[in-house]
Amino acid sequence: MSMKLLKVKTARFSQVVEECGKPHVYTLWQKPSADRHLQAQIRNNRVMTIQKSDSGTDFGIAGFKERKGATYLVFPKSLKRFADERIIGIDWVLMRE
């Protein structure tokens, strides 16, 4: 059996913030399907899901993925251009106050 390594494209979080603005952390207070504001942000490609990798570092993916323990960020501009990339180097200092 041969293992084919999948090359994942990556982008740095600082680059995403530079292009899409400073995000804010979005807290889920209700089911995502019932949260009209969140649904609008998802439709506009402004949500990023932050999760922990197996090694314990944070990484992000553009789009909303319901995951246990995930953090959701909402950006002022669309994340569409980062759709197929793994966002690395999450810097919590770059969040909007």
Image (cartoon, rainbow, N blue to C red):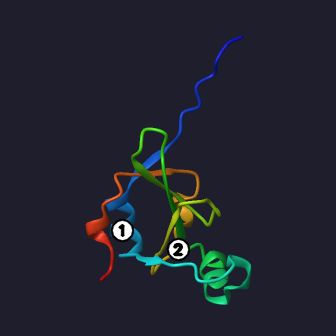
65 sits to left or right of 91: right
Mark 2 or mark 1: which comes first in sequence?
1
11 sits to left or right of 97: right
Image position of 15 with respect to 9: above or below: below
Instruction: Please give the residue where the numbered disc 2 appears in the rendered image.
Output: 78
The quadrant in which the C terminus is found is bottom left
Q: Residue at x 62, y 59 (%)?
A: 67
Measured Cα–Cα span from mark 2 to mark 1: 11 Å
Query: Which structural element holds mark 1?
Result: helix
Q: Residue at x 42, y 72 (%)?
A: 20
Instruction: Please give the residue where the numbered disc 1 appears in the rendered image.
Output: 17
Q: Are marks 2 and 1 in contact (CB under 8 Å)?
A: no
Given the image, on which type of amino acid does mark 2 rest? Ser
In the rendered image, residue 52, in percent from the top left (x then y), is placed at: 47, 50
In the rendered image, residue 3, in percent from the top left (x then y), is placed at: 64, 18
Q: Quadrant of residue 24?
A: bottom left
The quadrant in which the N terminus is found is top right
Image position of 75 with respect to 82: above or below: below
In the rendered image, residue 59, in percent from the top left (x then y), is placed at: 45, 52
Q: Quadrant of residue 90?
A: bottom left
